[in-house]
Image (tube, coloured by chain):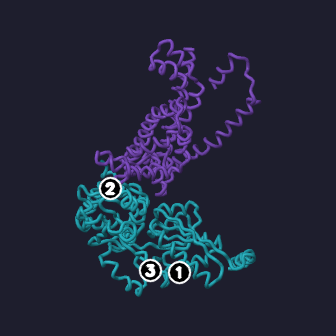
Amino acid sequence: MKAVLAWASPVQRPISILRGFRLTLGLSLVWLAVIVLLPLSAVFVRGFDEGWRHFAEVAFSARAWAAYQLSFGAALLAAAINAVLGLLLAYVLVRRRFPGRALVDALVDLPIALPTAVAGIALSALHAQNGWIGQWLAPLGLDLAFSPAGVVLALVFIGLPFVVRTLQPVLEDLGRSQEEAALSLGASRVRVFLRVVLPAIAPAWLTGVGLAFARAVGEYGSVIFIAGNMPYRSEIAPLLIVIQLEQYDYAGAAAIAVVMLVLSFLLLLGINALQAWQRRRQEGVA
Amino acid sequence: MKLRSILLLLSLVLAWPLAAADYTLLNVSYDPTRELYDEVNKAFAAQWAAENGGSVRIRQSHGGSGKQARSVIDGLKADVVTLALAYDIDEIANRAQLLAPDWQKRLPDNSAPYYSTIVFLVRKGNPKAIRDWEDLAKPGVAVITPNPKTSGGARWNYLAAWQYGLEKYGSESAALDFLTRIFRNVPVLDSGARGSLTTFVQRGLGDVLLAWENEAFLAVEELGKGEFEIVVPSVSILAEPPIAVVDKIVDERGTRAVAEAYLKFLYTEAGQELIAKHHYRPRDPETAARFRHRYPDLRLYRIGLELPSWSDAHARHFANGSSLDQVLANARP
């Protein structure tokens, strides 16, 4: 809301192709409620079906804590890795012209298109002790498959496109001229990156990382094939939900889901706040 | 009765344009029975077409037994269920009332047209010298089993290990400790028996797989000739995977006759032959005698004898807060 007003006030009311502010706002809120809020509130209600005690017993058991730690920890780590490597990849794709660039560009989307189970099976086949990669890493004591490291690996895989795809258009818009101007004025490369490029791409970057993180927290299909799924060790929270369902404990499954929802929401809210802060700071500078 | 005959008449009238009816059935089964039912379905379809005209096509669905039961409870339209243990069909009867509670008395041999047991699959030459259940608890032995919460086979092997521990070490707490030591050796929990077989055979993980006897044979004879060996422990468990027609679904879909014929086919000579071919132990004495050389004699614990009934076993070992949860908690690093 704030952003919309701030945008609207200095200029005269912008001409919009969307007429009827109230109608469109109302429609979109109803749509959001039906598509997002309704199912989520059903999860909340379900979670307390069998009372607070049952909720706490399942949602805050030692096993559940271990699963949250793994799910959120691995998702954060994967998002951080994607933040760095995704930025690099996006930068290379936008700024460099090399043979096969179109091919690489198309490859980036593959982790979204691929059924996640296929990704999980492929990754575990590669990284198992007898896999193409695993056979070389295993003697070094690096067992990626069937361990928490495998979880991070799968989450990096599925999260990559989100960072790259949100950064690409922004980097394209940015153009080279500002960078070139800064360089010609004697700024070092690092300084140009930090003071010119980074502020311009930071909001999109954060969005991409946030999306990659959110996707990773909820990921199930690819992870279960490579995680090992041992309770307290390599069991992700979504798997624990499925296990609760399989023993017909629907309230317990919903209870874990509620905790995940709240934690995810808080983290995403944090990322949004960071973005807003960054934007304000930038506007202050400009 | 009258209503039923009217419905029958109505369905006949409606089905008239199709001439001799074409049926499709959905068989919701547990994880390792893919190959068995592939062949059974073909054989049954041929027999049905010869005797009744019209075609019958049977679709199969496979997965961990508990998971499959839940799918049916949640609305998967299974005409027949062929699961790994009676408890899972009991759950369908109790929770969704899709079939009569006494379903297990409707077909011979506790509605289990074959039985099987749990054996060990080890790598060639048995490098870790695994002979019996107690060897699974030794430090440095990696044990592969599916998750007992989701897999029927895993529940059978958990109960076998439990009973072994109870008899050998003399108390429940000692049995719990024994299971804890075994689960400390488990690096991966797959949701079904086939997933564990893949982990052991294709991913090369683990020193020993606790497997259905038929899965162990499949690995030895087809997946990796010469790479694996079967170790038969001193004692194991009598596993009776039962079958049932899901009353509500077959009545709704008008498939009762063909579904019942399908299950009965498993008890015929042809059905028993296929069962034995896929390394399940046949019930028919003649067929059993012919395949006798394949199945080692060993003592088998029985549900309802050494072991409690399924509902007791489930409450004590597999429900929330039961012995399995304790074992997993104790086994954590």
Mark 2, secondary structure of its residue: loop
- The residue carrying mark 1 is B264
- Give residue B67's position: percent from left, percent from top: 48, 60
| Left or right: where B302 falls relative to B273 | left
Q: Residues within 10 Å of mark 3 (few under 14, many from 20)?
A: some
**B311 shown above or below B281:** above
- Give residue B232's position: percent from left, percent from top: 29, 71
Asked if labels 2 and 3 share a chain, the reply is: yes
Q: Is residue B224 visible?
A: yes
Q: Nearer the viewer, residue A74 or A20?
A: A74
* Residue found at x 47% / y 33%: A83
- Give residue A184's position: percent from left, percent from top: 51, 14
Asked if labels 2 and 1 share a chain, the reply is: yes
Return the disc, 2 or 3, that comes first in the chain's sequence: 3
Of marks 2 and 3, the one in the foreground: 2
Q: How many marks?
A: 3
Return the disc, 2 or 1, that comes first in the chain's sequence: 2
Check residue B186 in the rendering and tell me which mark sits there, or answer none. Answer: 2
Q: Chain for mark 1?
A: B
Q: CA distance from mark 3 to mark 1?
A: 12 Å
Mark 3, secondary structure of its residue: helix
| Left or right: where B230 falls relative to A17 | left
